[in-house]
Amino acid sequence: MTKEFRHFINGEFVSSERTFPKYSPLNNKQIGVIHEANKQQVDDAVKAARAAMKGPWGKMTVEQRVAKLYAVADEITRRFDEFVEAEMQDTGQTLHVMEHVFIPRGAANFKIFADVIKNVPTEAFQMETPDGRGAMNSAIRLPKGVIGVVCPWNAPFLLMTWKVGPALACGNAVIVKPSEETPATALLLAEVMRDVGIPAGVYNVVHGFGPQSTGEFLTSHDGVDAITFTGETQTGAAIMKAAADGIRDVSFELGGKNAGIVFADCDFDKAIEGIGRASFLNTGQVCLGTERVYVERPIFKKFVQALKEKAESFVAGDPTDPKTTMGPLISKEHQAKVLSYYEKAKKEGATIVTGGGVPDMSGDYADGAWVQPTIWIDLPESASVIQDEIFGPCCHIRPFDTEDEVIELANATEYGLSTTIWTQDLARAYRMAQGVDVGITWINSWFLRDLRTPFGGSKKSGIGREGGVHSLEFYTELRNVCIKL
Ligand code: NAD
């Protein structure tokens, strides 16, 4: 059955004249029709959001808002299976990752930020004045206004709620532009918002593409007060230009080319498990994943062999089958991009340890966007697959000898999102954490997230930090009130 993915504007599901097809990544068959919002519809959404800020939403107490956000999280949990199903159809990713990571973490995003806003203090300063009477300064925290939320496709629900949760907790209204590849869960969330009584206009969804389409209409609309974006670095640059008109604030979570670093004293099995996840989870479509692995020379050969076995152990197939451990890429277009890098690696002289092509998928899945988990060695650091973000299930492994050398290798990229370091020597781990230029360093783990901690990238991997109280910097304005006594 073909689904229709409409917009959600001012509490209503709305159609457009223009639509485009949504294909399943599993078999490339059309599974839906997505409506493409035009300028007028984006404008309607902005007006609805602005009106909601002046209406009942803007007048709610923090306590009332927090209660609503808890209700949103509970309703997502009640409709958990529908969210799992919808996201699985959009992305083709496995039931396991949906049930254990993406959907529960998405629901948690509403509770955690509700708790943050309920408990966060502001500041007060008592000031002396020449007349001896003094003055009191206090800061009050206000919502920023209407927030444009532009999302990618790789973990659609998790990444969208990571922005919508704090934005609403802080009292803003939002207009979400999901990726053109993954429209479904943003709309299920619209039903949830409506059903728990979030006022019309607070949460809006407009579908479409980026340039000269919905994304650009939204980010260049002067009624949008700030833009939070997760996606490619180049897109971030385009959005930043749009935000310059009107001097609007941006929060960016962008691309990465993260290094995994493994020392000879690591817990070997755990390191293989950890790097295996970091390179291959979600078919390598995780911004925090690693496509460059550096291994201390004494264990290099053993490591390559063990990671090869790990890569070859993944089972591609029906995402609902518990035996399936790897899904397809998001689309045939992305498959072509990843395969073009597999070809480049060959041309640039890589030794292919495993993979390098398309798995043999039979029957209904033959035309899906599948690729093999792939490992290379023996490339110079200048090789394309070591420099560019591929966003596929692949990594290059290279030996190293010293801490200084591996810090230099890890930092030789324009990106600075995350790293995962494996060693039993915690003093060394801490030295490394200070040396590698990234926003998040995992020691003996990967993708372990405490939502209260600052999240974001250095260099071309982002601007700003979100998470816990850090999200408040972007989603609220602090206003100083000075009272002369
Ligand atoms: P993308 O930049 O192609 O698209 C992201 C969103 O931006 C989509 O909704 C798209 O329609 C929209 N868009 C594109 N051009 C636009 C424009 N000119 N104006 C306004 N909107 C525009 O990214 P993607 O391919 O969907 O996602 C993959 C990328 O996201 C990777 O680079 C990955 O590293 C990055 N990512 C980063 C993080 C992080 O936390 N740093 C998390 C997930 C993904």
Image: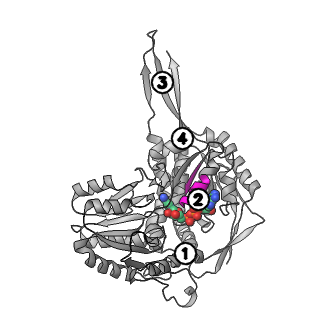
Residue located at (49% from left, 42% from top): 473
| First reached walking from the N terminus: tag 3 or tag 2 | 3
Q: Which mark is residue 51?
A: none
Looking at the rendered image, the disc whose residue lies closer to the viewer, 2 or 4, is 2
Q: Crowding near pointer 2: few (<14 within 10 Å), some, many (20+)?
A: some
Rendering quadrant holding ligand 1: bottom right
Q: Mark 2 near ligand 1 (CB under 8 Å)?
A: yes
Stretch in magenta: 227-239
Tag 4: residue type?
A: Thr
Residue located at (53% from left, 50% from top): 251
Looking at the rendered image, the disc whose residue lies closer to the viewer, 4 or 1, is 1
Query: Do the numbered discs 2 and 4 sit on residues whose CB atoms are within 8 Å?
Result: no
| First reached walking from the N terminus: tag 2 or tag 4 | 2
| First reached walking from the N terminus: tag 4 or tag 1 | 1
Tag 3: residue type?
A: Asn
Q: How much space separates mark 2 and mark 4, taking CA atoms?
A: 24 Å
Query: Do the numbered discs 4 and 1 sit on residues whose CB atoms are within 8 Å?
Result: no
| First reached walking from the N terminus: tag 4 or tag 3 | 3
Q: Which residue is mark 1?
A: 337
